[in-house]
Amino acid sequence: PDSRVEKTALRTLDVGIGLDDPESYPAVAGVLELAQDLDLAVNWYALPARQQHHRPDSERQDRAARHRRYRLENRHRDQRRYLQRADGDCASRIRALLTQHGIALREGEVAADWAGYASLDGYVGSPVFRLGEETFVGRQHLPLIRARLP
């Protein structure tokens, strides 16, 4: 296989932004910086709104599922606590920030394999990055994504 083809394929980063997720907002600047530094094409997608967290029967959960549920519940508690002090709508602020930078969200073009992220057991955040066949959830992965790019 021609390595130039593989490198070209990895020069595009798909970024799914959860407009209902306050953690999407600070991730935008990091993605823009990464794209500028590495001359990277970015496809921005609006992830479906997160479903209300459901409480599955705890007797049937294994340890890993229980811990995912605990992390998700803690995250929701933190968001509720911090959002009480927020003035305004998170989604409209994220949209305004993206528009300010000339970024058009592809809301109607969410690929089928992205659509399930909002309902996955253990889904705890956005943005979601797709680099080739790899998926990363959370802005803390930007340094790793930078290192993986050719």
Image (cartoon, grey):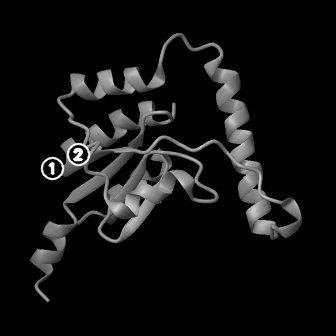
User: Residue at the top extreme?
Assistant: 87
Mark 1 lies on a secondary structure that is loop
Residue 57 point in image, percent of width and height? 83, 60
**Image check: 138 left or right of 97?**
right
Residue at x 49%, y 13% (from the top left corner): 88
Judge by depth and name the residue closer to the eye, 84 or 136: 84
| Residue 129 at x, y percent in the picture | 38, 54
The percent position of residue 72, horizontal first and vertical second, equals 69, 47
Residues at marks 2 and 1, CA–CA distance in whole angstroms: 5 Å
Front position in the image: 72 or 27:
72
Q: Which residue is mark 2?
A: 35
The percent coordinates of residue 146 (x first, y second) are 33, 56
Q: Amino acid at mark 2?
A: Ala
Quadrant in which the N terminus is drawn: bottom left
Query: Which residue appears at 74% of the width and 43% of the height?
Result: 73
Q: Which circle marks residue 131 in the picture?
A: none
| Proximity of marks 2 and 1: CB atoms separated by less than 8 Å | yes
Residue shown at the point (53%, 10%) measured from the top left: 87
Residue 97 against residue 7 in the figure, above or below: above
Residue, far bottom: 1
User: Where, by quadrant of the figure, is residue 122 drawn?
Assistant: bottom right
Task: Please tell me whether residue 118 is drawn above or below residue 97 in the rendered image.
Answer: below
According to the picture, the residue beneath numbered tag 1 turns out to be 39
